[in-house]
Image (cartoon, coloured by chain):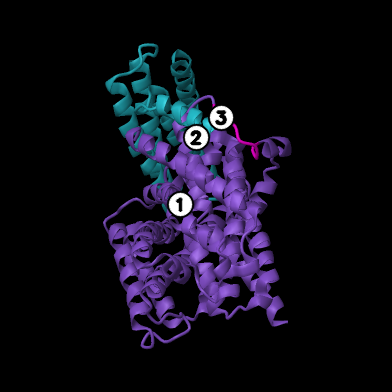
């Protein structure tokens, strides 16, 4: 019974962790500009994430190591430090974007500009981290994040053309706006394959004391949870294609994105969007703050557990306190979270090999995983997607910057 | 791998600053946002504070993009006509924001209708710019 309960909570975690400001923004921009044509990177990213999440859960249940622990142990501290720098830098940018997303949700609800919300929002996130337990963060925020299912309702109410939708799942080369198209492909892949989710998930498996008996459940959570998360992202893209594209709206600001559901759900669409973003970004901000604290603590061999009191793992608590405080600073000075989001999603793609390649080596190491090591299918899917994502990121990021 | 390199080359060839067509798309995007927002406000689907703030944002962006475009307008369009349509659109949007604060729906509807006419005119200009490229 306990495992069945954990299964449902795990699925909720996956759903809550998948859809946040990055995936909503990139999917909305893609749908508003290119219609259904960019559904395929969402599918590709989701497929890759299913494998990555399953692998990180498998590593934790079989070896009792988190991904961070194992990378440091297997490759040594100097290499680990390099991974830490790249991953934490990008995760920090994503945290800024998520805190900004919460601030923006509050701005459109109250009319008070988002920089004013930066400090109160960061304080509440920190307070929950300080006082809360892992279970509260994992399940409370994620359950509220389920409000994002309203995007699916909105998509269905707009009666999408299913043939066009299906054709969007196949890659195409556009006739115009090529730079923008490929940059969005990279951003969507970056938003879907968030390495922080992988690190969070493996640490969570240790926090929840998973053992080998959880292997089938881990596989089920990864497949079902991430598929559902990807489905939500696709719903956002479809809504943008049907509600914003006909009006010629390209999503450059959060205010424009807030119009997404007003056509499909006239009475509640605006408020559902604002609340969905609030809870989804809140959940993601908690998960990223925790992940960064896990990363430092596991990497440097400090005590770590969200279930312990801050006095028992003071360095762990210090890291998230510092990170949350620092993330509020750019927002107080009015840095646009949408710009940070778009750039951080693309940078996530560019830095994916840094975190994923050593992880793939680990997952194929018989000393660590024995008979539970990766098969060729998971190696191929993850390897190919990461390569595509990396090459496209290297080409499109400089072009997008040069093109303004 | 070969396919990826071809794609990379296609992307490299397309490297350029925003074209007049892209600037016109951005203009249409902000006018479209104001029209959608206006229709939403009339149906009571968006709150007043969000509506006025976003209308102001639309007006500011139109001013900025319009000024950049009119610095070197494409030869195929009547730049004076574009300038006057943009000025009119901005003034309609500003008026809409005032009418939201006054909660004057009938007058708001009239101004929104005028903005939709400007939207059509801008769309025609955008099509000309697109065709000339």
**Residue closest to the far top:** B76
Where is residue A134? Give x, y as percent: 51, 78
Q: Secondary structure at mark 1?
A: helix
Q: What is the chain identity of the residue bearing mark 2? A: A
In the image, what residue occupies the spot 38% across and 75% down? A297
Where is residue A162? Give x, y as percent: 72, 39
Main secondary-structure element of the magenta-colored stretch: loop
Q: Nearer the viewer, mark 1 or mark 2?
A: 1
| Chain B image colour | cyan
- Are both tags, 1 and 2, on one chain? yes
Closer to the N terminus: mark 1 or mark 3? 3
Q: What is the chain identity of the residue bearing mark 3? A: A
The answer for how far apart the CA atoms under marks 3 and 2 are is 9 Å
Q: Which residues are magenta?
A: A168-174
* Residue A251 visible, this orientation: no
In the image, what residue occupies the spot 43% across and 42% down? A393
User: How crowded is the residue under tag 1: few (<14 C-alpha within 10 Å), some, or many (20+)?
Assistant: some
Q: What is the chain identity of the residue bearing mark 1? A: A
Q: Please say if the residues under marks 1 and 3 sit with CB atoms less than 8 Å apart.
A: no
Residue on which disc 1 sits: A353
B110 or A170: nearer the viewer: A170
- Label annotation for residue A173: 3
**Residue closest to the far front:** A367
**Height in image: B107 above or below A156?**
above
A34 or A309: nearer the viewer: A309
* Residue A23 visible, this orientation: yes
**Height in image: B14 above or below A201?**
above
| Chain A image colour | purple
């Amino acid at each position: 019974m306990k495992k069945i309960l954990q299964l449902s909570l795990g699925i909720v975690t996956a759903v809550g962790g998948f859809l946040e400001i990055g995936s909503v923004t990139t999917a909305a921009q893609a749908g508003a500009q290119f219609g259904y044509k960019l559904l395929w990177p969402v599918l590709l990213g989701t497929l890759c994430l299913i494998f990555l999440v399953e692998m990180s859960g498998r590593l934790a249940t079989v070896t009792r190591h988190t991904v961070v622990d194992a990378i440091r142990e297997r490759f040594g501290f100097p290499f680990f430090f390099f991974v830490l720098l790249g991953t934490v830098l990008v995760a920090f940018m994503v945290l800024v974007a998520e805190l900004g997303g919460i601030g923006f949700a509050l701005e459109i609800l109250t009319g008070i500009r988002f920089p004013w919300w930066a400090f109160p929002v960061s304080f509440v996130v920190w307070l929950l981290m300080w006082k809360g337990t892992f279970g509260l963060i994992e399940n409370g925020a994620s359950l509220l994040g389920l409000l994002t299912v309203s995007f699916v309702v909105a998509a269905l109410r707009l009666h999408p053309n299913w043939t066009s939708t299906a054709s969007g799942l196949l890659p195409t080369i556009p006739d115009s706006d090529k730079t923008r198209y490929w940059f969005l492909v990279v951003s969507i892949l970056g938003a879907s394959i968030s390495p922080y989710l992988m690190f969070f998930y493996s640490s969570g498996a240790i926090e929840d004391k998973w053992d080998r008996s959880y292997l089938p459940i881990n596989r089920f959570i990864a497949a079902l949870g991430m598929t559902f998360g990807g489905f939500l992202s696709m719903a956002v893209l479809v809504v943008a294609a049907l509600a914003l594209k006909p009006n010629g709206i390209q999503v450059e600001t959060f205010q424009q994105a807030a119009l997404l559901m007003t056509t499909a759900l006239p009475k509640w669409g605006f408020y559902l969007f604002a609340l969905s973003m609030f809870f989804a970004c809140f959940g993601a901000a908690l998960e990223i703050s925790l992940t960064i604290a896990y990363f430092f603590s596991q990497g440097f061999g400090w005590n770590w557990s969200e279930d312990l009191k801050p006095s028992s793992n003071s360095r762990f608590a210090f890291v998230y306190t510092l990170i949350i405080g620092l993330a509020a600073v750019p927002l107080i000075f009015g840095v646009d979270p949408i710009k940070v989001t778009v750039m951080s999603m693309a940078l996530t793609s560019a830095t994916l090999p840094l975190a994923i390649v050593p992880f793939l080596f680990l997952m194929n190491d018989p000393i660590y995983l024995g008979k539970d090591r990766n098969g060729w299918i998971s190696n191929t899917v993850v390897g190919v997607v990461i390569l595509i994502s990396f090459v496209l990121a290297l080409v499109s990021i400089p072009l997008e910057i040069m093109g303004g | 791998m070969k396919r990826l390199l071809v794609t990379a080359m296609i992307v490299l060839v397309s490297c350029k600053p925003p074209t007049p067509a892209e600037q016109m798309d951005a203009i249409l995007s902000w006018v479209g946002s104001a029209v959608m927002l206006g229709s939403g406000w009339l149906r009571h689907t968006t709150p007043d504070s969000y509506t006025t703030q976003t209308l102001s944002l639309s007006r500011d962006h139109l001013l900025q993009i319009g000024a950049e475009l009119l610095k070197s307008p494409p030869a195929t369009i009547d730049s004076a006509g574009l300038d006057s349509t943009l000025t009119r659109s901005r003034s309609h949007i500003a008026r809409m924001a005032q009418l939201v604060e006054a909660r004057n729906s009938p007058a708001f509807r009239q101004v929104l209708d005028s903005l939709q006419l400007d939207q059509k005119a801008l769309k025609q200009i955008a099509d000309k710019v697109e065709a000339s490229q």
